[in-house]
Image (cartoon, helix red, strand yellow):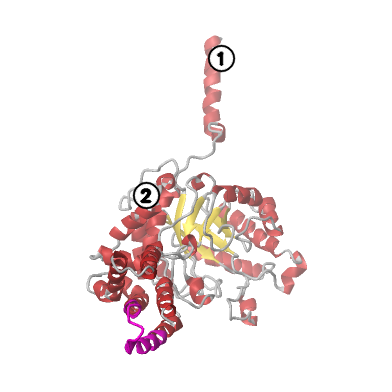
């Protein structure tokens, strides 16, 4: 009898292990990447070892406004991602009509074939491919107006035919290998069509949530591997809203929810903030980090700028509180790779991340760079961003020491150091053009490179101007020339080297 009881007990334990796996580990699922859950083809990139603090989803989202990348640029980005600890790519270019304004149109055979090649490239590089589709009423950008066609082309949530169009689009993409989709309602109107309002009233968010739940239920029945992400219209902040209340109350729990931080652009993202949001949306958020994206410098600021500095001010323990992080790059894919390389290092090993070391390593590994020092100088002046308060501490230290000596009537090392830096800037365009073999990168940075070189030349002239005697007949001539040149520099809509312009202005003012 004792042996029989023991045998029965063993059977019960085995059955429990098979049918109740969740009871074996109350701490939740292991922190693994999505790719770790499925085998990779023999010709695919081998998987990395997964550290304890590695982010599960480490992504790049092509989610900016402006000219979408070409398929060739995307292929190169996927290769770069595979070499820099990323595991997820999200296709979400705002100005691709098939993604937003013509969301319901099926791809032509040619376009579908191109998309299939992209998905195969992602698989080969060990990258999960996610397709975003945004069927809501697009919110117009600054200077634009909402048109009747924008409204008409958007989805009618209560229309069976419109929902079927959405199903057809997803199924076409599923046929070429897409398994994860993101239903995107970011940057859409906070309202519905009148016919939908008859059902939902002003609760437009419930229409979004109902559609997401419906799609997940239907598509999961057809394909158990189907996954759905959700980008809500309320995608930033730390305060509750009816939208977030709807998400935590009604949105199916397996759906990943996007959150960008306390605002759209964030100097910092902390684990304390994330824990607040987790309670508000009823799940760990998937962070959409809007760095180093620069589309807003075109659309809003009208002063296009590059952001080629490292990621900073993200909590080292963030991976414990989020489902992952996806970085939104610049319009310029090659230039984006400097910041993205540092982001990849942070996502893979956040507790050991050092922004300066990560940046230096990214510069060393940039494709096609021979003169690393010259390229680093350009990137230094292209680094100021919201993350570091628009400060180039290196140049500011040079000028601070110079002004201190100048005001004390001293000439020496501080002047020499500043002059050498300005001379390096003035010759930087030629130095880089002769040494960069990555022509696409050079083409991207060239407008800012030319402007930086010109600023260096004018600043050298300003430095000479400071030492002209009061009675020198050239003083007034040079002053007028400097004022004319700095006005021309400031009228350029590109933004780089504002600290240099400040030095020139201070030099002119110092001798008035």
* Left or right relative to 368: residue 92: right
What residue appears at the point 69 percent right and 70 percent down from the top-left corner?
191
What residue appears at the point 22 percent right and 73 percent down from the top-left corner?
434
Report the span colored magenta: 462-484
State the residue position of label 1. 5
State the residue position of label 2. 40
Mark 2 element type: loop
Q: Earlier in the sequence, mark 2 or mark 1?
A: 1
Type of secondary structure dominating the magenta stretch:
helix
Q: Badge 1, how many Cα within 10 Å: few under 14, some, many 20+?
A: few
Where does residue 226 sit, x and y in percent of width and height? 52, 54
Label number found at residue 364: none
Question: Splitting the image into 4 quarters, where does residue 370 fall?
Answer: bottom left
Looking at the figure, which quarter contains the C terminus?
bottom left
| Foreground label between 2 and 1 | 2
* Left or right relative to 145: residue 15: left
Question: Splitting the image into 4 quarters, where does residue 495 fall?
Answer: bottom left
Residue lying furthest top in this view?
1
Where does residue 311 sit, x and y in percent of width and height? 43, 57
Where does residue 26 sit, x and y in percent of width and height? 56, 33
* Left or right relative to 464: residue 173: right
Q: Look at the numbered discs 2 and 1 and tell me whether their residues touch, using CB distance below 8 Å.
A: no
Where does residue 75 sit, x and y in percent of width and height? 35, 65
Measured in 3D between alpha carbons, the distance from the residue under mark 2 to the one under mark 1, in whole angstroms, is 44 Å
Mark 1 element type: helix
Q: Is residue 62 above or below residue 16?
A: below
Visible in this render: residue 21? yes
What residue appears at the point 70 percent right and 58 percent down from the top-left corner?
241
Give the camera-side residue of 479 and 47. Answer: 479
Looking at the figure, which quarter contains the N terminus?
top right
């Amino acid at each position: 009898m004792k042996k029989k009881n023991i045998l029965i007990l063993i059977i019960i334990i085995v059955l429990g292990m098979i049918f109740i796996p969740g009871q074996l580990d109350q701490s939740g699922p292991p922190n693994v990447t999505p790719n770790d859950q499925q085998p990779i083809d023999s010709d695919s990139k081998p998987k990395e070892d997964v550290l304890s603090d590695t982010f599960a989803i480490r992504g790049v989202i092509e989610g900016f406004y402006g000219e979408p990348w070409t398929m060739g640029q995307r292929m190169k980005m996927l290769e770069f991602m595979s070499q820099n600890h990323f595991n997820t790519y999200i296709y979400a270019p705002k100005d691709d009509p098939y993604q937003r304004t013509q969301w319901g149109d099926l791809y032509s055979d040619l376009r579908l074939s191109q998309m299939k090649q992209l998905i195969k490239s992602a698989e080969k590089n060990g990258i999960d491919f996610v397709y975003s589709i945004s069927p809501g009423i697009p919110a117009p950008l600054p200077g634009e107006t909402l048109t009747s066609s924008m409204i008409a082309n958007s989805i009618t949530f209560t229309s069976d035919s419109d929902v079927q169009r959405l199903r057809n689009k997803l199924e076409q993409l599923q046929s070429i290998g897409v398994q994860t989709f993101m239903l995107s309602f970011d940057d859409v109107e906070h309202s519905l069509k009148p016919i939908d309002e008859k059902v939902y009233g002003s609760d437009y968010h419930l229409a979004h949530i109902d559609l997401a739940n419906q799609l997940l239920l239907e598509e999961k029945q057809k394909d158990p591997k189907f996954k759905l992400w959700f980008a809500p219209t309320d995608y930033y902040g730390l305060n509750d809203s009816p939208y977030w209340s709807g998400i935590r109350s009604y949105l199916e729990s397996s759906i990943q929810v996007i959150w960008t931080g306390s605002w759209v652009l964030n100097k910092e993202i902390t684990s304390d903030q994330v824990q607040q949001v987790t309670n508000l949306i009823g799940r760990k958020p998937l962070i959409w980090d809007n760095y180093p994206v620069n589309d807003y410098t075109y659309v809003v600021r009208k002063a296009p700028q590059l952001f080629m500095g490292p990621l900073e001010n993200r909590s080292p323990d963030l991976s414990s509180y989020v489902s992952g992080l996806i970085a939104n790059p610049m319009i310029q894919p090659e230039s984006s790779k400097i910041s993205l390389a540092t982001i990849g290092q942070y996502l893979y090993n956040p507790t050991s991340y050092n922004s300066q070391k990560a940046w230096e390593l990214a510069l060393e590994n940039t494709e096609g760079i021979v003169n690393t020092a010259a390229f680093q100088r350009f990137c230094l002046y292209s680094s100021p961003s919201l993350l570091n308060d628009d400060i180039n501490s290196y140049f500011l230290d040079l000028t601070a020491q110079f002004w201190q000596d100048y005001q004390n009537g001293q000439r020496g090392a501080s002047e020499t150091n500043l002059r050498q830096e300005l001379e390096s800037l003035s010759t930087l365009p030629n130095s880089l053009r002769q040494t960069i073999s990555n022509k696409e990168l050079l083409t991207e940075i060239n407008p800012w490179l030319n402007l930086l070189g010109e600023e260096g030349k004018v600043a050298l002239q300003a430095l000479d101007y400071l030492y002209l005697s009061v009675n020198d007949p050239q003083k007034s001539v040079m002053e007028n020339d400097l004022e004319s040149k700095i006005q021309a520099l400031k009228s350029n809509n590109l933004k780089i080297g504002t600290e240099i312009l400040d030095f020139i202005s201070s030099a002119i003012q110092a001798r008035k």
